[in-house]
Structures are given as C-alpha cells and as structure tokens.
Amino acid sequence: MTTVAAYAAPVTKALLERTTIERREVGAHDVLIDIKFAGICHSDIHQAREGWGEAIFPMVPGHEIAGVVSEVGSGVTRFRVGDRVGVGCMVDSCRTCDNCEADLEQYCLNGATMTYNGIGRDGRPTYGGYAQKIVVDENYVVRVPDGLALDEAAPLLCAGITTYSPLRHWNAGPGRKVAVVGLGGLGHMAVKIAHAMGAEVTVLSQSLRKKDDGLKLGADHYYATADPATFERLGGTFDLIVSTVSAPLDLDAYLSLLRTDGALVNVGAPEEPVSLDLFSVIGGRRTLAGSSIGGIRETQEMLDFCAEHGIGAEIELIGAAEIDEAYERVLNSDVRYRFVIDTATI
Amino acid sequence: MTTVAAYAAPVTKALLERTTIERREVGAHDVLIDIKFAGICHSDIHQAREGWGEAIFPMVPGHEIAGVVSEVGSGVTRFRVGDRVGVGCMVDSCRTCDNCEADLEQYCLNGATMTYNGIGRDGRPTYGGYAQKIVVDENYVVRVPDGLALDEAAPLLCAGITTYSPLRHWNAGPGRKVAVVGLGGLGHMAVKIAHAMGAEVTVLSQSLRKKDDGLKLGADHYYATADPATFERLGGTFDLIVSTVSAPLDLDAYLSLLRTDGALVNVGAPEEPVSLDLFSVIGGRRTLAGSSIGGIRETQEMLDFCAEHGIGAEIELIGAAEIDEAYERVLNSDVRYRFVIDTATI
C-alpha cells in the first residue's frame, strides 16, 4: 500500500479537508499515475452531498484525472513511465458481459467500478482524483495526445466524453441542427465538439449572459430559455438536443423544439423525477433518451478527436484549498467553464 | 351534399345517439365509400369525453373504417366502384411539407386532417366512421387486400398501423425481444404483428387473466405486471417495449426492463402527465419514444403484410345501439379484442 495525500469529504455534506488515503500496490496490469490535474464535475457535488442517494464516506471525489505514468506493472503493455494519461469515471468493469465486449463498459451489466464512491473488484472503496496519485488497471487508462495540455485535458475525461458520446451516437454532423441546453462544464464541451463535428449549433441557456462566450466557443445561435418567445420561435427545429443541466427541465417544452424523429438526450441528471406528457413524444415520433459517459475506446477516440481539432476545456485553475468555494460557485453557475485542481497544492 | 345516417355524441360526455350528417359532394379526387364496418378505438372515448382536451361537437367518432367504393370522382385513378377499401385516422394533410413528402403524413408539419374531431381543408368539421357513408380524397384511402375480411380489417386502420409502424421503425424481427404492454385492442394487434415479424414476443399485462389468449395470438411469454417479481425477473431483457395502455404507466419500472440501447415506445396516451426519473434513460442509454399511427403508404404496407400473414383483428361485432355499452366495456378492459360496429344497423 502507498499512502497518498488527498482531499476528502469525511461525511455527507461536509466541507472537504486534507487527509491521506491508501492506494493499492501496483499489480501486474496496473499503472501508477502521478495526478497533475483533477477537474471538478457537478456530479462530485451531487455525490458528496448524497443528492443521488446514499454514498460512501470518507469520499475523495474526482473523475476527471490527468497525469503522468510513474510506474507500470510487469504485465503492462500499453503504457510506459512518463506517458501522459487520463482516467475518467470508471476504473474497472466485468470485462466479460455483452456490453464490456462491445466497448460499452460504462453500461457493464455487472456494474462498472466507478472511480470514486464505488467498490473495487477487491471489495474496497474507490477514491478519486482529488489526490496526488492513483493506481489503475491499464485497460481503464487513456492516452492524452501531445497536442493537449494536461490541465485542459482533465475535464475531457468526464465532460468531454459525456457530450462526445451522445453527439456521435445521435449523428451530430454536417446538415444537422444540434441544440445544447446549458452552457456550463458539460455544455461548453458539447458546443465545441458539436461545432467541430460540423453541426449547426444552438445554445439554449437561461439568459443571454454568456452569449458572447457561446458564440466564441463555436455556437451559431444563442437563445435565452427564460424568454417564452424562444420556445415559439424554435418549435420543430432540432434534430438533436443535448441537455447538460441537472436542474429539472420542462421536458415537454424542450421536446417541442425537436423535428420529427428528433432526440432529446439527457446527460445531466436532476435529483428529482420530472413530469412528462407522453403526447410530447408521440407527436413527431420524438425520442427522449439518456447517455452516460462513454466506453474506454470511445474516450480515447474523443481525446484524439479533441487533439485533432485543438479542443481543450476552458478552465479556471485552483488550489485544493479552494475546492469548497469552487463547489459553491458551480452550484451558482459561476464558473467559466470548469474548475481544475492543481493537485500539487494538495 | 349528401345526408347520411350516423351516430354522434351531441355534446361532451353524452351518450351517442342516431342522427344525420352532411357529406360533401364527391369531388374530382374523392371516393364515396359505403362504410360497412367501423371499429371502436379507445381514443374515440378519450375524444368524445374530452379527455385529451377540447373537442368539436356534435362528434361522429370512428377512424377504423372498412367499406366499399360506391362512387369515384372524375380524376380518381387508384380506385374503382366496388373496391374494398379502408380509411384510418386521417383524411388529408398538406401534401407539401417535408413529412408529407417523406410519406409521414401523420406528422404533417401543417397538421394532418383527422378523420373526425378535426377541421377539413374546406373549413368544416370532419365526421368519422360511425356512419353509413364517407367521402375521402383517394390519396388517403387504402386498399383492403382480398384475403382480409372487411370486419376484421377495420381495426387494422388504427390499431394495426399504430402498432405496425413502431414495430417496423424500431426493428422488431428475428433475434429481437419485444414486449407488448397491455393486451387490448392495440396490444393484441401488436402481439400478432410482432410475432409475424419473427420477434420473440412477451405480453406484459396486469394479470394473467388473458394468458391463454395471449399465447394463442402469438406471444412466447406472458407475465403479470401486478406481480412485482415480474420486474425483477425481466430486468434488462427487451430490445423494444411497445406500450399500448392509456393508463399512466410507471415508466421507470418499464424502462428497467430494457436492454442497453433499448426503446420503450408509447402508442397509448394517458390523459395526465407521468413521472420520470431521468436516470432510467441515462443508465443503459435507453430511449423513451412515442409513435402515432403511420403514413398512408405504410398503412397499405401493413394491410398487405397482414393479408400475407393471415392477420385480422379479433373482433366482437355489435349493432350501433350497443355503442355506449361497448364504451363502458372498453373502459373496463372487457373486450376481446375490438368492438366493430356493423354500420348497417345505424
């Protein structure tokens, strides 16, 4: 075991504090990663405050991890010491079910092992990226291409893949009209990626406060959802809407913005159930769907795509002592567009 | 104008009574149809009782119409006097929008003209199939193949196409596991059609009361949804679930029965909004969708498919005087499986 400095929530809803955790010895197929940067994802807050149900404490959040390999196990073939790598939301899965075999480990039928707030295959709790080191099986590690800075790459491991995967799956591309709901950590990545894929991109945000940013990030259009006229004007417009917000959404209103056969895909997840009029999907054969991160192969594909298109996250680099303040600012939608912890400060 | 005997609801929630209505003169592109049989669809009741919103009265319901052509306009090319024909839920559409041009008239962007409780292109209310005759543009009339009896064909015009279309669109067929929720008018057609398409078919019904019927209709499996064990046993099983019920559904429970990338498609429409936990679609990248009848071309394809596979509706033939009693029995799920009015009794 190796003792590692980390930031943890000792109990639910507590402030995060500096502590130490134990990482397992580097096994034959493991890599030891010196974490350099860890993004702060809204879901870190949901989980640290048990908004999505009972959680495991102490909790070291963080599933947007970028760092450098500092040791490899004897059986590791894909990585060498010094490689720039990333780890996202999962660190293991059963590897044998239909979904794992189809590179859809995120939907592992036996349950993927989440990077934190999970139980590892060894029966011990997993601890995430708000820490100086992590040990991960090489099959759940991806390579950060040279063109990407590590700090701007970290948020790609969740915010990037979470938006890239549905954009690919629902065919964002030339000739397709894509709306992105919410211009936060996930939303700003969705805009950049959908634009790079060649889609016509519209941001649907509560207000026009971030409009200039949105257009710079690659949006073609920007509308305020607080203005009811937006819903009248845009009825029946989009092939695909990716909702990145975790506040409860008026699903019926957003579904009305879809063309026939269009899809509203939720990657944000409100803590409470939402209301839906089924006529909203029956009319126009519309689809309401969800998507959860992406598989390991697709995560690598996303990083390569981002490197090719010069896409990193827009980040605000912080020290570990500022995590709690950052959480409050995330909850107030006051971040442009992702907080990233410099783990040297832990 | 031609005066035609019909059964109508004079005002909302009233009993239906015999009356007369006016049909337009047969125009150049119209056919006059002697209606022989009209199915009773649950949506007739929803509309006659304004469960789906304000309606037009007097209302002559009926959009499962089978009859014989008795007169054709000078420009009619597709039908001749004596042809056995059907009319479904719509009698016109704009014919110029993207959807009309793509044979998706049911999603006409300018609004299809519904067979009853609609306003025709001439600005007058439309009246449905609980009547002795109807005048319809030939482009919205389909041919009933010789192999199908007219009385058993009538329900295909709504119940048949409403289930055929999503089964086709979401690829029911060999190697696919399809569940049908509810074994009523729509459900029993869904079972027959999905079975004929080669899918493995499961009925999910409240109780096992109709199990023998379900298996005879073509189901491979039959489960009671009132038994919580059903939801445990069948978790993650189906590629496609077609829900035909108009009672509010526990969407989260049904979504949990889908495999990764599976779709729950609603063709039944409850009068009230339903609750949904978005995690139910995010997990397993599941889809909640809807589907509304089918286009005219697809309706003809469905009739041809049914004739080829010897599929008619299971019907209970009634006289017009029994309509109100039949409505009550439909509401009590006491019909096996579709009431069809012999319009000679009007």
Image (tube, coloured by chain):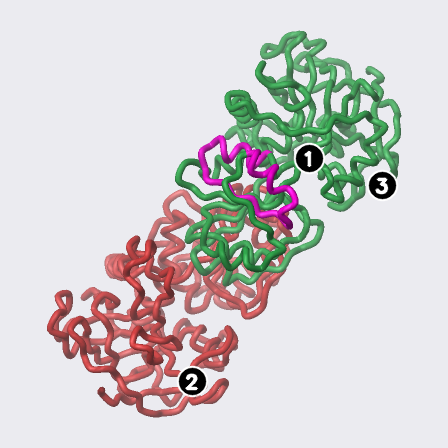
Chain colours: A green, B red
| Residue appearing at x 57%, y 34% in the figure | A216
Mark number for residue B57?
2
Crowding at dot 3, Cα within 10 Å, few <14 / some 14-19 / many 20+, comes out as: some
Question: In front: A109, or A6?
Answer: A6
Tell me residue B328's x, y (percent).
Answer: 49, 82
Residue A98 seen in the current view = no
Amino acid type for the residue under numbered disc 2: Phe
- In which quarter of the view is residue A122 placed? top right
Instruction: Judge from the rendering whether residue B48 lies leftward or rightward of residue A184; answer left or right.
Output: left
Quadrant in which the C terminus of chain B appears: bottom left
Mark 2 nearby-residue class (10 Å; few <14, some 14–19, many ≥20): some
Residue span colored magenta: A189-217
> How far apart are the alpha carbons under marks 3 and 1?
27 Å
Query: Mark 3 or 2, which is nearer the eye?
Result: 2
* Residue placed under numbered mark 1 in the picture: A336
Q: Are marks 2 and 1 on the same chain?
A: no
- Closer to the N terminus: mark 3 or mark 1? 3
Q: Residue B312: x percent and y percent? A: 30, 66
Tell me the SS state at disc 2.
loop
Report the quarter where the N terminus of chain B lies. Answer: bottom left
Which mark is drawn over residue A9?
Answer: none
Residue for badge 3? A12
Tell me the mark number nearer the camera, choosing from 3 and 1: 1
